[in-house]
Image (cartoon, rainbow, N blue to C red):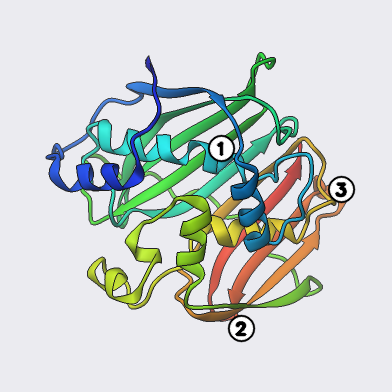
Amino acid sequence: MSAVGTTPRPLAANYLRSLVVPRPHGAVDLPRRRVEQRGVRVDPERLAAWSRLCGYPLRSRLPLPYPHLLGFAAQVQLLVTEPFPFRLLGLVHVAQEFTQHRSLPVEAELEVSVRAVAMAPHRRGAVVDLVTEVRTAQDGEPAWRGVSRYLAPGARLPGAVPPAREDPPAPGPGAAVGRWRVGASAGRRYAQVSGDVNPIHLAAPAARLLGFRRALAHGLWTASRSLAVLDGRLPDAVRADVRFKAPLLLPATVEHLHERVPEREGGGWRTAVRSRDGSRTHLLTAVTPL
């Protein structure tokens, strides 16, 4: 695999590139390249704005989901540079895994790398997995690893559709329940603090052009807000397996459920975000200590 050390282009330029650069038909061999960035520093103002929006207090260590943002621009660059047979616009985030072996100090100088590790047919199109790894300059192994699974609806790849991965268990009847009001501007507000400016999150007219009735909440906002409920109760070494089950159309009022998993079952937590009446599950998360 070749490594490319680079500062990613601005997101707007990469979205434009996705529109004008021809996409190949059929499968490509993966992995092909890795995008690397050294000397990465966290912007304290951006972190503070993100933390307020997602419900995290400010601490000396990065919140569990935050390193994903450090690699997001590199993810976008990879998606428009590699010959993936689908367009960037319209991709849907369907699953995310965060694995943290040790927490990352806010003021540390970081190294970030992104690579593609898999692409496969899906019953609704095609999926690709992108791996983001973050370490400090002193780390031998990554301190944090994220696996992002994106769906390209309607894309076609040869081969059989692999069996679907089993979902994390939902919280049971005794789970704690909270209620969130998610406003129509939630997508635009998260785009401002995260850099994720996919049109499906910004406004209903743009979302309709891409097949959705209304704008959607960002999956990473929903996941981060869900994990923030557990802030202070998670160990440094932890894994969160997040599944985005159904789009959260904006505006919305939803329920958040969370429960502790008994030690005899491995410990950790289960969380879910679902519609007010419980008829639709938007997100499931299993959080387990390492």
Q: Position of residue 171 (x, y in %)?
A: 72, 66
Residue 276 — which label? 2
- Neighbor class of circle 1 (other Cα within 10 Å; few <14, some 14-19, many 20+) is many
Q: Quadrant of the C terminus?
A: top right
Who's the residue at 31% across and 69% down the image?
Answer: 207
Q: Position of residue 93 (x, y in %)?
A: 43, 53
As measured in the structure, the alpha-carbon distance from the residue carrying label 3 to the one carrying label 1 is: 27 Å
As measured in the structure, the alpha-carbon distance from the residue carrying label 2 to the one carrying label 1 is: 30 Å
Q: Nearer the viewer, mark 3 or mark 2?
A: 2
Locate residue 57: give its quadrant.
bottom right
Instruction: Tell me the amino acid under the disc marked 1.
Output: Gly
Q: Position of residue 152 (x, y in %)?
A: 30, 51
Residue 146 — which label? 1
Q: Is residue 246 visible?
A: no
Judge from the rendering whether residue 197 lies leftward or rightward of residue 141; answer left or right. Answer: left
Judge from the rendering whether residue 159 lies leftward or rightward of residue 5; answer left or right. Answer: left
